[in-house]
């Protein structure tokens, strides 16, 4: 019963998406190199050239927010007969993608 639920296309797609987010955020580096959780009081310490565990978590969170925003933009046309709801979903999705992209660009440009 539980295996059947895991093999449903939607659940499998969400698991693969979560795996892709973690890999792109640097989970392999964290598992292999075992960096410190953080450098002092900083989650993200610019200029060290190394990635901390907390930085990987922040990047994974920002990737997840960006992907959630893209999914909201993709799903918004379902509500085309409810214009106000569609507008709200589109606005929130677009804002989350823009905020995620700007914060990721800021993090990578400070490195």
Image (cartoon, grey):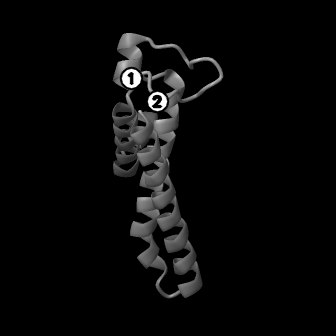
Q: Position of residue 35 (x, y in %)?
A: 46, 14
Q: Nearer the viewer, residue 35 or 68?
A: 35
Which type of secondary structure does the marked residue at label 2 adopt? helix
Q: Position of residue 54 (x, y in %)?
A: 54, 26
In the figure, 88 relative to 57: above or below? below
Residue 49 disc label? 1
Quadrant containing the N terminus in the rendered view = top left
Q: Report how far apart the C-alphas of labels 2 and 1 lie in the structure.
A: 13 Å
* Residue at image coords 45%, 59%: 97
Q: Position of residue 76 (x, y in %)?
A: 46, 73
Q: Position of residue 107 (x, y in %)?
A: 46, 40
Question: Is any part of residue 1 visible from this angle?
Answer: no
Q: Earlier in the sequence, mark 2 or mark 1?
A: 1
Q: Which residue is mark 2?
A: 56
Asked whether the residues under the numbered discs 2 and 1 touch, taking CB atoms below 8 Å apart as contact, a structural biologist would say: no
* Residue at image coords 47%, 66%: 94
Q: Nearer the viewer, residue 57 or 16?
A: 57
Q: Residues within 10 Å of mark 1 (few under 14, many from 20)?
A: few
Instruction: Choose mark 2 or mark 1, whichever is in front.
Output: 1
* Residue at image coords 46%, 53%: 102
Which type of secondary structure does the marked residue at label 1 adopt? loop
Residue 111 disc label? none
Q: Nearer the viewer, residue 99 or 5?
A: 99
The number of numbered discs placed on residues in the rendered structure image is 2
Question: Is any part of residue 22 visible from this angle?
Answer: yes
Please indicate whether residue 49 sits to the left or right of residue 103 in the image. Answer: left
* Residue at image coords 41%, 47%: 105
């Amino acid at each position: 019963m539980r295996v059947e639920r895991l093999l449903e296309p939607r659940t499998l797609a969400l698991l693969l998406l979560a795996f892709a987010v973690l890999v792109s955020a640097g989970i392999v580096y964290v598992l292999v190199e075992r960096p410190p959780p953080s450098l002092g009081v900083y989650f993200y310490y610019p200029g060290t050239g190394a990635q901390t565990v907390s930085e990987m978590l922040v990047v994974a969170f920002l990737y997840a927010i960006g992907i959630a925003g893209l999914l909201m933009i993709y799903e918004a046309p379902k509500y085309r007969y409810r214009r106000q709801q569609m507008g709200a979903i589109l606005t929130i999705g677009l804002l989350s993608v823009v905020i995620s992209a700007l914060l990721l660009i800021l993090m990578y440009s400070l490195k």
